[in-house]
Image: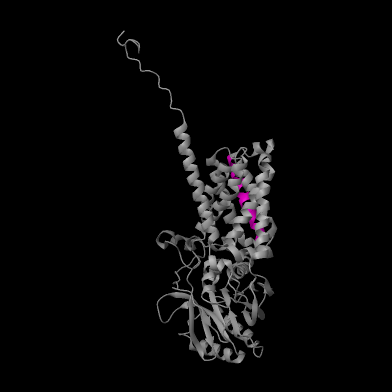
Amino acid sequence: MKTLGHWLASPWRRSAAAVIAGALPVLAYPSPSLWWCAYVALVPWILLLRTAPTGKRAAYDGWCGGFGFMLAMHHWLLPFLHVFTFVLAALLGALWALWGWLVHRLLADVPSRRRTATALLVLPSGWLAVELVRSWQGLGGPWGMLGSSQWQAEPALRLASVGGVWLLSFLVVAVNLAVAVLIAVRQARVPAVAGLVATAAATSAAWTLSPRPAVDGQVRIAVVQPGVVGGPDSGDRRFAREEQLTRRLAGQEVNLIVWGESSVGFDLGDRPDLARRLADLSRATGADILVNVDARRSDKPGIYKSSVLVGPDGLTGERYDKMRLVPFGEYIPARSLLGWATSVGKAAGEDRRRGSQPVVMNVGDDLRVGPMVCFETAFPDMTRHLTREGVDVLIGQSSTSTFQQSWAPEQHASLAALRAAETGRPMVHGTLTGVSAVYGPSGQRVGSWLGTDASAAQIYEIPLAHGTTPYVRLGDWTVHAAMLILAAWAAGEGVRTLRLRRSAPEPRVPPVRTAHGSPARPGR
């Protein structure tokens, strides 16, 4: 330990260690998918923060760790944004500076049992505050929230139905803190063990008491994934490939056919020939087709990404325009200041336009679906809102073709499991180039994934459920509770500081001497 402490005495080495420690949790996400390591992946970072020589240094180590986490989580953006990826990681990583300071404040030296118990509540709440801020769409949205690493753990999915992905993040951080205390602070092991027991008890209670979605029906939905189609006339050739795959579904009694994001590269008002071909496909298959149009609109100015429903008689009039756009990918925030990003990467040359509201579509047979586009599936509030509006199936249309050989497609597909578990509604994640996936109302996988090497049409037998989960009813109560915990702790620290100042003895002031004489006999 002394050797390690001496090695970390160098500021540069300490910073490098913080970056590496911050990046470790990424192993819990796809593609590695080592979900279990999330419960110990923060421990090296926490131990580094608590042993920082000062609170200021701990804040800097928090920033470095946040940079490592953000860079590792979004490393697949490097071919897209180049050096700007590092800039974004540094800006977002700064959000963990205060968390680093909090870890040092509560766990430095030999914390008392009371201080340790406080840390097990305050520090996970501080982590949620960071996730809340970075979940703002303008900062990139809630991609890579710590709780989303648990998408394939059934007990975690059950917890998500109670408190959403927020509750999972809170508990994962709490477990990491308890493990770090067990390793480093022998005197505070009792509250650490108590924290682990409380987490296990909460998980068991949720497993036992939270209502399971009652399956009350089934629907057959097909996903059409054409695969990568490049070249100057890729729009027409992609449409032809999707058309070919869709015709194979004729006679198979599907209720809905889903095409991926940007599956149609032309406005259907400008291309009535494509609209007619889609209507022919709908008649041939006996199902409505949900396509996604990425084009300049003919009825209003600007480029939109829109989910458009086509039936046997043509366009049904059901349309959803994407509301939450990808920063730099679909628009440049503060373009007058950051427009230079287009010169160093493949950032958006022209801003897409936003839709104004979510849409619930009726696709026949009393089936109601709620479409979302691309990274909108990362936002739990969107799926919760659609569920309250009465959808039977959640649908995400995506395309990660730019990032085919990276972890991005699998990371994106895994998010649908969380959204399904939170809402008690099945979710279809249909993509242009993979990974396409479907999850049932408990977040369980339905059928097999369509990987990035697949060009196929696949039918999924999807169970339906219509119960209401606690998360849909109560919303982000975990976040509200975390903010109250932080506010209560901050108020308590303020009162404590004020009392210490008032109880401190006043400094003794020596008697004033004059230039001549003593204080007892002035002038002498």
Pick whichever, 64 or 135, lies toward us: 135
Which image quadrant for residue 7?
A: top right
Farthest front residue in view: 209
Q: In this rendering, would 523 be left or right of 388?
A: left
Could you tell me residue 357's position as x and y percent? 45, 73
Q: Residue at x 52, y 65 (%)?
A: 346
Q: Residues in magenta?
A: 11-29
User: Can residue 84 be seen in the rendering of this structure?
Assistant: no
Q: Is residue 121 magenta?
A: no
Q: Is residue 148 above or below residue 509?
A: below
Q: Is residue 283 above or below residue 501?
A: below
Q: Is residue 425 above or below residue 516?
A: below
Which image quadrant for residue 3?
A: top right
**Quarter of the image containing the C terminus?**
top left
Q: Residue at x 56, y 52 (%)?
A: 66
Pick whichever, 211 or 25, lies toward us: 211
Farthest left residue in view: 523
Could you tell me residue 476's position as x and y percent? 53, 62
Number of marks: 0
Q: In this rendering, would 357 be left or right of 111?
A: left
Which image quadrant for residue 448?
A: bottom right
Pick whichever, 134 or 480, lies toward us: 480
Q: In this rendering, would 436 be left or right of 337?
A: right
User: Can residue 169 be seen in the rendering of this structure?
Assistant: yes
**Quarter of the image containing the N terminus?**
top right
Could you tell me residue 217's position as x and y percent? 64, 81
Q: Main secondary structure of the magenta part?
A: helix
Could you tell me residue 498's position as x and y percent? 45, 38
